[in-house]
Image (spheres, rainbow, N blue to C red):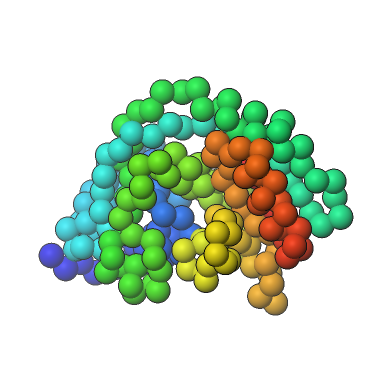
Amino acid sequence: MSVALLKRDLELLETLTSRVRFLSVRQVTRIWWPQHRSDDRTRRRLRRLAAAGVVELHRINLRLLPATNGPVFVWRPGADEPDAASLSDVFRNRWSAAARPIEVCVATSVTANLFASTAFRLPRLEQRDHDMLLATVYVQYRQRRPDLAARWIGEHVLPKAGYRVKDPDAFLRADDGRIARVIEAAGRYSAEHIENFHEHCVEFDLPYELW
């Protein structure tokens, strides 16, 4: 089935391949149909895009974190280093809600190839809660700081940082092309993981936010 892609559709495909790995149907509504309380119109459009082979729809179990007004920790070059142990406790103890089925959309391999991305299909099971958290952060940026959301670049469209180096989840690019900020969905990070991430950012003078 072929479908004429609207500007909104192209923005969605670019988001799924260049910014985050998936979005829930509810998040798609919040970004592109904010005037609608129901997801019915969103779901109908996504099903047409799925029939055209550019997205996939899946119902998967996810744990959602409570709404937050900002990152858990922010660091800039010259500031004090994080208390990794305390942060790890926060990150690991916040996943108390039970998983529930949520409908999400992801790009297909065809779409990923068009955008020179490696992001397509569902991530591995153990990565899904993390990727949902990152998608939630991105939606918050879209709604509160659309100017910064437009500068958001996902890790899957950039070269890997290096052997056994954890690539940050997303970057905010400045006008001159430099990295102005790193965005990291901290998931259930251990103290060691936080320390290693911090050291990487210190080495390259990368301001960062841990969510």
Look at 65% across and 57% down and name the residue there: 182
Farthest-out residue, left? 1
Look at 58% across and 25% down and name the residue there: 93
- Image quadrant in which you'd find residue 164: bottom right
The answer to whether 9 appears left or right of 197 in the picture is: left
The answer to whether 114 appears left or right of 72 in the picture is: left
Residue 19 position, x and y percent, is 48, 60
Q: Is residue 4 above or below residue 145?
A: below
Q: Quadrant of the N terminus?
A: bottom left
Look at 26% across and 48% down and name the residue there: 57
- Image quadrant in which you'd find residue 102: top left
Residue 84 position, x and y percent, is 72, 38
Q: Is residue 128 visible?
A: yes
Q: Is residue 96 above or below residue 71?
A: above
Along the line of sight, the residue nearer the viewer: 73 or 197 = 197
Q: Is residue 100 above or below residue 12?
A: above
Residue 69 position, x and y percent, is 65, 37
Q: Quadrant of the C terminus?
A: top right
Farthest-out residue, bottom? 176
Give the number of marks.
0
Look at 44% across and 60% down and name the residue there: 15
Q: Is residue 8 visible?
A: no
Residue 184 position, x and y percent, is 60, 50
Along the line of sight, the residue nearer the viewer: 158 or 112 = 158
